[in-house]
Structure formats: structure tokens, C-alpha cells
Amino acid sequence: MQSPLKGIRVLDLTNVLSGPFCCAQLAYLGAEVIKVEVPGRGDLARQLGADPALNAGLMGVSFLAQNAGKHSLTLNLKDPRGKTILKRLVAGADVLVENFRPGVMDRLGVGYETLRAENPRLIYCAISGFGQTGPMRDLPAYDQIIQGLSGAMSITGDGDSAPMRTGFPMADTIGGLTAAMAINAALAGRGETGSFIDVSMLDSVLATMGWVVSNYLIAGQVPVPMGNANFTAAPSGAFRTATAPINLAANKQEQFEALCDVIDRPDLVRDPRFARRQDRLENRAALTGEIEAGFAAFDAETLVTRLNAAGVPAGPILTVPEALALEQVRGRDFLRAFPETPGIDRPVTNARAGYQMDGAAPDVGLAPPALGQDTDAILTDLGYEAGDIADLRADGVI
């Protein structure tokens, strides 16, 4: 695969998910990513995950998932010598990403204006819950908080279960993707000066909710929780069969008619309640009852096969292990195994980025790093002698 960011150096000063996920995307595109971590404990994600032993060894699963392809440097930015090292790194870097609360980097004496003096072409990306401006800028923000504030939880679930969070850290992940997209755009358009990129997780999530946001702003429709139903079309959503629920998306007229043929209910096409797209939306509940009555004669696997053969999009509802076991997923080289990872007594397998380039899945050559494993090598490249490095380590600077 091409490495379009080959030769780009990224300083990753981030923790947990949004920033590490952003920098992981840049690593998959070929950038050299140096993860700058607090001595002794590193990224908090090193202590998070489902395996307590890995957490205790500062190689938690949450860290392993987002940090392949990176180097690890430990650095105490509260020490003047740590600040000096960061500035020397910035002088040779292209991008710096941080996800501290607004103002933290300035209070440490290494904010954007200070670092830009070291490297005018630096692209500096700050990811925070609410952005660098506005009355909420200083509030703490985690994924759960943003999911609630964005309105996403209010429309997830149904009338009985909403509000409900998504089953993964959606806001963190969207914030990280937004940052990676903005950084790549800034790199593509960079001239003699760099950029300051201000990513708000709240803004990022709202931007991905475009259809429901615009339905409210333009059409005056207040979004409501609809469970597994698709608010834009019917029949579209999850439907019961004789054995297990399946997903169905008969969004077009011809797909609805083909669906009716599969369940031997051509009368539904002629029923005035369901004849047109808008009719089906307005009579969604009645239509669901008719379809599920027809589906009751089929097991889920047979029904999915018949519907797809008839041109009606349908699919099973899988668990995460079942999804990862799909031949479709494995056949696209989506999973990346690292047979040996520092401090880990087993192979580590991660999901790659979700695309292929020139027919190949993106790859990184480095397993997730142990805390500080590259500190000596990076400082040596910066011109520090072995004695200097030993003194810095003895004083807790690295």
C-alpha cells in the first residue's frame, strides 16, 4: 500500500481514545508517530481494558487497540528540561496533537504560540470536549457526557429504553476521525505557515447527525427515539422471524414489492395504507405487524438468503465475535496480528483502518510500544549523550 504520509512526523501528546485514535489513523497512512507520555504511568489507557494483568503491566487492551505503529517517549513537561526536549522535537515535527483541557498546554509553557516559534510550519491540533472557545470550554468532558449533550442518546433506543448510549465510545471515535481528517487537509494545503486546528467532540458528533439535525432545522421535525426502525423509510429496520431478528431495508418501491412477493403477500402492495412511500411511513406499525406475520414462516438464515436473491437488502444481526469471523471481514485483511509485543505474553490482534488503498489494507510495522521504550533512541537522535540521558532519567524528567 502507498504511505501518503511517509516522511511526516507526528507528536502524539494524547490520552485514552480521541487523540490516540486520531494519531493511529495517521500512523496507518505512513506517518512517524512519537507518543509523548508521562513517566511512570503513561497514557491512562494503559491501565484500561478487560484483562487486569495487562492493565497492571501498563499494556491494557484499551491502549493496545489504538497505539500500534507508534514510538513511546516518556517526558515530564512540568520540568524545564522536559519542555526543552519537547521544543527540540517540535522543531523537527510536522504535527502535534493534544487532547488536554483548553489552557493546559499554555499553563505548562508549551502552548501553540510558544511551539509555533520553534516551528512556524507546525500543524497543531487540539481535541477537547467543547473546543477552545465558548462558555463550556473549561468543563470536563468524556464520551458519555458528549453523547448526552449532543442529543444522540435522546434518539437511541425506543420509547421505553431511551435515552441510551451507543455500545462503543462513539463521541471519542468521531472526534478522533474528525481531527485526522482536518490534519490531513492542513498537511495537503500547508505552505510556509502551519495551522491551529480546534476540534470539539460536541461539534464533531453533531456534524455526523446531519439528517436528524436538518430534519429539525429545516423541516421542523423534532427527532424521537425509534428503536431499530429507520426514520427515513419503511419497512426498514429490525424484524422478527421464526428464529431470530433480521435487518431489512426495503427503501425503494421495487424492493417493497419484491419483499411482498417473497412472503407471498402481493395484497400489501395494493393496500392503500402501504401503496406509496409516505403511506408506509405513516402506517409503519401496521406494516411491521403484517411483515412479521409473513416472516414467521421462515427461519432467519433462509429469509435473508431469499430476500437478497430478490434484490431486497437484508442481513442477520450478529454479535461482535460473529462479525469479526465473517469471511468478508477476514478476506479484506482487516485484522492485523502482532506475534510479539513488548511486555505481552500473547499475540496482539487489532483492527486496521477501515479502507484499502491500491488494493491493500493499510499497515503499520510496529507493535504497540511499551512505556518509554524509544526514549533513549529519540533523545540520542536529538543530540543527547548517554550521560545526559542517564541524568534526565535519574531526575524523573524521562
Image: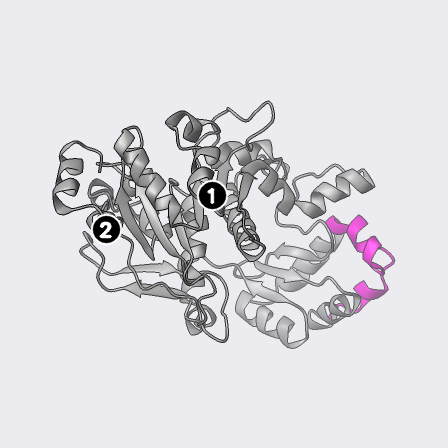
- The residue sitting at 23% across, 51% down in the picture is 374
Can residue 186 be seen here? yes
* Front one among 38 and 76: 76
Marked residue nearer the N-terminal end (1 or 2): 1
Range shown magenta: 264-285
Q: Which corner quadrant holds the C terminus?
A: top left
* Front one among 46 and 244: 46
The residue beneath circle 2 is 374
Left or right of 284? Residue 70 is: left
Q: Note whether 53 is above or below 78 in the view shown.
A: below
x, y percent for residue 172: 48, 42
* Front one among 142 and 24: 24
Circle 2: is it few (<14), some (14-19), or many (20+) Cα within 10 Å?
A: some
The residue beneath circle 1 is 169
Q: CA distance from mark 1 to mark 2?
A: 29 Å
Which numbered dot is residue 192? Answer: none
x, y percent for residue 98: 43, 39
Residue 278: say if magenta: yes
Disc 1 residue type (three-letter): Pro
Can residue 48 be seen here? no
Quadrant position of residue 270: bottom right
Labels 1 and 2 touching (C-beta < 8 A): no
Q: Note whether 130 is above or below 211 in the view shown.
A: above
Residue 325: say if magenta: no
Left or right of 336? Residue 129 is: right
Badge 2 marks a residue whose secondary structure is: loop
x, y percent for residue 225: 65, 40
Disc 2 residue type (three-letter): Asp
